[in-house]
Amino acid sequence: MEYPSLSHHGGTRGVTGSCHQLHLDPSTSLLIDCGLEQGSEAATGAESAALGFGILGIQALVITHVHLDHVGRIPALLAAGYRGPILCSEPSARLLPLVLEDAYKLSISSEPAQVARYIEFIRDLIVPLPFEQWHAVVEGPGLACRIRLQRAGHLLGSAYVECDMQHGQANSRYVFSGDLGACGNPLLRPVQPPERADVLVLESTYGDRLHAQAGDRRQRLEGAIDRALADKGTILIPAFSLGRTQELLYELEDILHRKALLGGADPGPDGDPLDWSQLPIILDSPLAQRITSVYRELHGYWNAEARVRLAKGRDPLDFSQLISVDTHARHQQVVNYLKSTGRPAIVIAGNGMCSGGRIVNYLKAMLGDARHEVMFVGYQAKGTPGAVIQASEGAEGFVQIDLDGRMHDLRAKVVTLSGYSGHADQAGLVDFASGMDQAPDTVVLVHGEPAAKAALVAALRGRMKARKWMTSIRVAI
């Protein structure tokens, strides 16, 4: 085998489980991400908790970002005996313990002392790295490797990883994209392509589509709120705690701010004013609240526009109409109140695919009432309740949905608000791969469905041909 070389322990069958091993020589390697396979890609039974590969020779684990499909196998890695550093960006170092603590409580134990010991053990291994600075990982005679993290624009702290290796007199550079963000993220700085890459390991989640403009999604969100105010109903948004929730809060604050400047009330269909200033935005997810607090503390990593808004005295993640629901008892009170009154509201609650969490209680209480609306702003995996509800959008006639083993009538409106993807579309991926000063030797596609990969291969070949680059493009297996 020639070195450096790659092996993939996930992220090849679909869009989850990202885990890539960069072999520097027969006994030395780095691990880039250690993610959990989810949905239809996940193994069952004991296999679901297994690591699936040996750890001998792994010098460091490098994390691109803290979504579970990139970090969810870390407990299995530690159980297999790994005690090396977990290298990640400074914001990811703050967020990773929160994400792993939540997963530990859900899947292993919620006993406080046990959870505290586990998280302290994790924290001792985390090594935060600043963006844009090289960090030596392997230093030895004839073999050296350093890494550099660059902003990926997917969520706060997300990075792509540049690995620069020296083998004797030979130098090579591998770049791992992680998940690249869509352009126009309201909070994050835009992605800049790498300087160079001999081998680029590139995600392909949306390699077969183009996103709607960000301005379109804000207009549709505002229109949905107008409907809720007119119908005296609640908008239920099943939201992912990390990234998507913070984007939504940012844009809701901006809408409410602009409405306040215009007087706060618009005429409704019956002539009565729709009073935006009295509309509560309810965040009902303890994990999302903790993550949002970290986002606020790390405002130095926001983009310039978001920091200007903060400097003007507006807090886009903690505004006056935002209500956070903490305890389960308070959650039940809010559900019952919104069900029994005609008070319009927007509820953002976990989990994002309606397969558990507090959103399920809202759905049980409100799906049967046509005043209410379920708004999807994220991907719904096949087979989840969220996917079933989403599929009913625009359906006519009698529809029912199974929630926790009971059938519920579905009379609420259902809408999918496009444009909130956290992933770059085909154009963004192609621009990233072709934005370097010189041609990469190889592009390896991971983290995508077969159709998305096939479409991205064709688009990349077209761009490379136009640039007269002889880049090899292949799909990881």
Image (tube, rainbow, N blue to C red):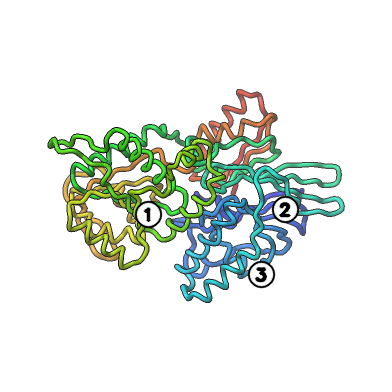
Residue indicated by mark 2: 23
Q: Earlier in the sequence, mark 2 or mark 1?
A: 2
Nearer to the camera, 465 or 205: 205
Task: Give the SS element for disc 1.
Answer: loop
- On residue 353, the disc is 1
Which of discs 2 and 1 lies nearer the camera? The answer is 1
Residue indicated by mark 3: 81
Q: Please tell me which residue is depicted at 53% across the width and 34% down the height of the picture.
A: 428
Q: Position of residue 401 (x, y in %)?
A: 25, 56
Task: Give the SS element for disc 3.
Answer: loop
Circles 3 and 2: CB distance less than 8 Å? Answer: no
The answer to whether residue 207 is visible is no
Along the horizontal axis of the image, is 108 left or right of 230? right
Nearer to the camera, 412 or 270: 270
Task: Give the SS element for disc 2.
Answer: strand
Hey, what amino acid is under mark 3? Answer: Gly
Q: Earlier in the sequence, mark 3 or mark 1?
A: 3
Q: Position of residue 473 (x, y in %)?
A: 62, 37
Label 2 CA crowd tier, 10 Å (few <14, some 14–19, many 20+): some
Q: Please tell me which residue is depicted at 43% across the width and 45% down the height of the picture.
A: 315
Q: Which of marks 3 and 2 is nearer the N terminus?
A: 2
Q: Which residue lies furthest to the front in this view?
A: 313
Q: Marks 2 and 1, how far apart in space? A: 36 Å
Which of discs 3 and 2 lies nearer the camera? The answer is 3
Counting the numbered discs, the total is 3
In the depicted structure, whether residue 125 falls above or below residue 63: below
Label 1 CA crowd tier, 10 Å (few <14, some 14–19, many 20+): many
